[in-house]
Amino acid sequence: MTLPVRDQLKYWGIAALIFAVVLWFLGDVLLPFVVGAAIAYFLDPIADRLERAGASRTLATAIITVCTILIFIVAALLVIPTLVQQTSQLVQTAPDLFQNLQNFLAQRFPEVLAEDGVFRQTMTSLGQTIRDRGGELIQTALTSARSLISVLLLFVIVPVVAVYLLLDWDRMVARVDELLPREHAPTIRSLAREIDDTLSSFIRGMGTVCVILGTYYALALMAVGLQFGLVVGVIAGLLTFIPYVGAIVGGVLAIGLALFQFWGEWIWIVAVAVIFQAGQLIEGNVLTPKLVGDSVGLHPVWLLLSMSVFGTLFGFVGLLVAVPVAAALGVIARFLVAQYKGSRLYLGSTDTAREGGDDAA
């Protein structure tokens, strides 16, 4: 006998509550497993393609693991040290940049920077705060034993979890399918496919776009000689998943740094601006249409809201699960709206629905 809808809602509500409580209390413990699961989900299509090419699942996983290790070694040897060095230098030179900005404003707009003016005091305080707090943050991150252990655990546990989940991904999906309530299995499968399409379009598509644009910005800015080009490129690439934010933040930061570094050499300042304009053209006309598509279904405001809420409630783990949960809630909301529009609650009685159709005709 089928359970009443009220009882079903009660049980699913209890399950959601248990999930939230577990996430609340075990967020730090679950972090490596959530990251590993995200990596396995991201790489699963590559493993499926290798399987279709004739490789076994074990061989496909081994190929992906070896390639990933090689990429990580190259990044650890070439990119990460430079990134850390430039970030530290940027934090240390922030007061000098603000001082140069003050000097520029003092020459052009002397009335703005009175000796005891609010703007001058704010700029001085902001630059000093960035240097002090930024230095403290880097020093704490590097010297804290707890942070070091956490980082080591991430580097050890995450790859292991990702490899095992990638190896058993199809079997896990089949196992979960066996546990679905038989009465609602077709509907759940349909919703799951739609959620997967949304997630794959956004996470895999936008993740690839972020990597491509971040690499492009970093290499191009370093090629024109911008002092902190790698840092700016990484920041712009990471923020690309929010439409226009990556280009605006990265562009403002890069052009601001270029003004101080290349003041008087306008060709290089224009070159930095052209780099970000070209990046926007490439993203809008080539990368996003090809890799993401138009049917993602995640509005930027909805995405930011979910990340803010889950980040505040559950910390960094909340930020990681915010996108999948937002995608799932969006798909479920569209499904409920479709069900509502087909129900008598929306259509009314048969006679009312028929009269409404006649009036529309």
Image (cartoon, rainbow, N blue to C red):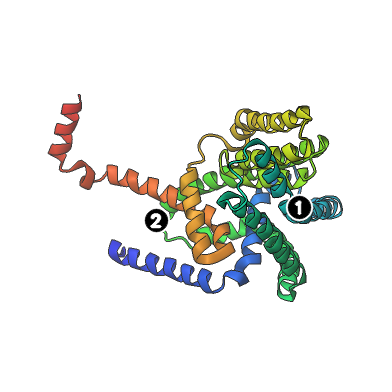
Query: On the image, which quarter does residue 353 sit in?
Result: top left
Q: Dot 2, how many residues are within 10 Å of its Cα: few (below 14), some (14-19), or many (20+)?
A: few
Above or below residue 289? Residue 94 is: below
Left or right of 249 on screen, residue 140: right
Task: Identify which amino acid the numbered label 2 is placed on.
Answer: His
Specify which label sits upstream in the sequence, 1 or 2.
1
In this orientation, does residue 32 appear?
yes
Picture coordinates of residue 98, whole percent (x, y): 69, 49
Q: Which residue is mark 2?
A: 184
Name the residue located 72 percent from the left edge and 60 percent from the top edge.
Answer: 163
Tell me what residue is drawn at x 50 percent, y 50 percent. Answer: 304
Few, some or many residues within 10 Å of mark 1 (<14, 14–19, 20+): some
**Can you identify the residue that label 1 sits on?**
93
Q: Nearer the viewer, residue 167 or 101?
A: 101
Residue 318 appears in which quarter of the rendering? bottom right
One can see residue 192 in this view: no
